[in-house]
């Protein structure tokens, strides 16, 4: 499968399958995984970026272990809606992943997800060092939770 739209996701999820959320950074990949009921996003340990091959292998192992049926990946568009180099890098990452897995990827506007994650970690009084370790996975959880909330709204509107 290639890139899918959020509206196509319900048909793509295997029974008991979960969704993963990714926040693709230059140094780390933040990861979050939904529960089987597709209600809540749970942060997972981040993946330290090395080379694409190593990053992809670590990610694919985690996605298989977590029974993921589709991946929501944050698309870092600029605040004015324009697309810069980070968007191009994210799209290139997905193109390369498509060669290695049948899992569908869904782009999700991630504007302000890192800001929201940082605020949440500050409110929980997480130390600066631990915030640095958790920020990308927390941002991935915000990305995934936004997609889960959208899927819930789509289900409500449909029936």
Image (tube, rainbow, N blue to C red):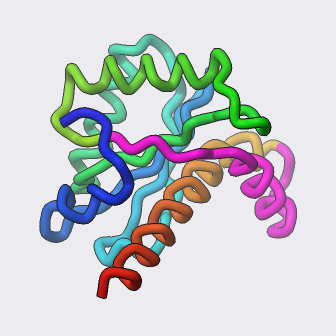
Q: Position of residue 29 (x, y in %)?
A: 53, 34
Residue 136 at what x, y percent from top left? 63, 43
Q: Quadrant of the C terminus?
A: bottom left
Residue drawn at (26%, 53%), measured in percent from left and top? Answer: 68
- Comparing 5 with 33, the one in front is 5
Q: Residue at x 48, y 54 (%)?
A: 32
Asked whether 120 falls inside the magenta stretch, the response is: yes
Q: Nearer the viewer, residue 114 or 58?
A: 114
Please name the residue shown 76% across and 57% down the image.
116
Q: Quadrant of residue 14?
A: bottom left
Q: Is residue 126 left or right of residue 151?
A: right
Instruction: Give the answer, above or below, for where 72 lies relative to 7.
Output: above
Q: Is residue 2 left or right of residue 44?
A: left
Task: Indicate whether 41 appears above or below 4.
Answer: below
Q: Tell me if residue 13 comes above or below residue 78 in the rendering.
A: below
**Residue 11 higher or lower than 68, as above or below:** below
Q: Which residues are magenta?
A: 105-128
* Residue 130 horizontal side relative to residue 74, left or right: right
Locate residue 69, reporting x and y percent.
23, 53
The residue drawn where x is 68% and y is 42% is 133
Residue nearest the observer in this picture, 81 or 64 = 81
């Amino acid at each position: 499968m290639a890139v899918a739209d959020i509206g196509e996701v319900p048909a793509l999820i295997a029974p008991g399958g979960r969704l993963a959320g990714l926040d693709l950074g230059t140094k780390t990949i933040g990861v979050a995984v939904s529960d089987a009921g597709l209600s809540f996003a749970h942060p997972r340990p981040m993946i330290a970026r090395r080379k694409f091959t190593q990053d992809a292998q670590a990610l694919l192992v985690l996605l298989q272990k977590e029974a993921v049926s589709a991946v929501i990946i944050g698309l870092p568009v600029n605040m004015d809606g324009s697309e810069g180099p980070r968007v191009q890098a994210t799209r290139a990452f997905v193109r390369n992943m498509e060669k290695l897995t049948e899992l569908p990827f869904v782009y999700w506007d991630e504007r302000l997800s890192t800001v929201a994650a940082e605020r949440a970690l500050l409110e929980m009084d997480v130390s600066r060092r631990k915030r640095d370790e958790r920020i990308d996975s927390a941002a991935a959880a915000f990305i995934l939770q936004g997609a889960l909330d959208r899927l819930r709204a789509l289900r409500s509107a449909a029936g």
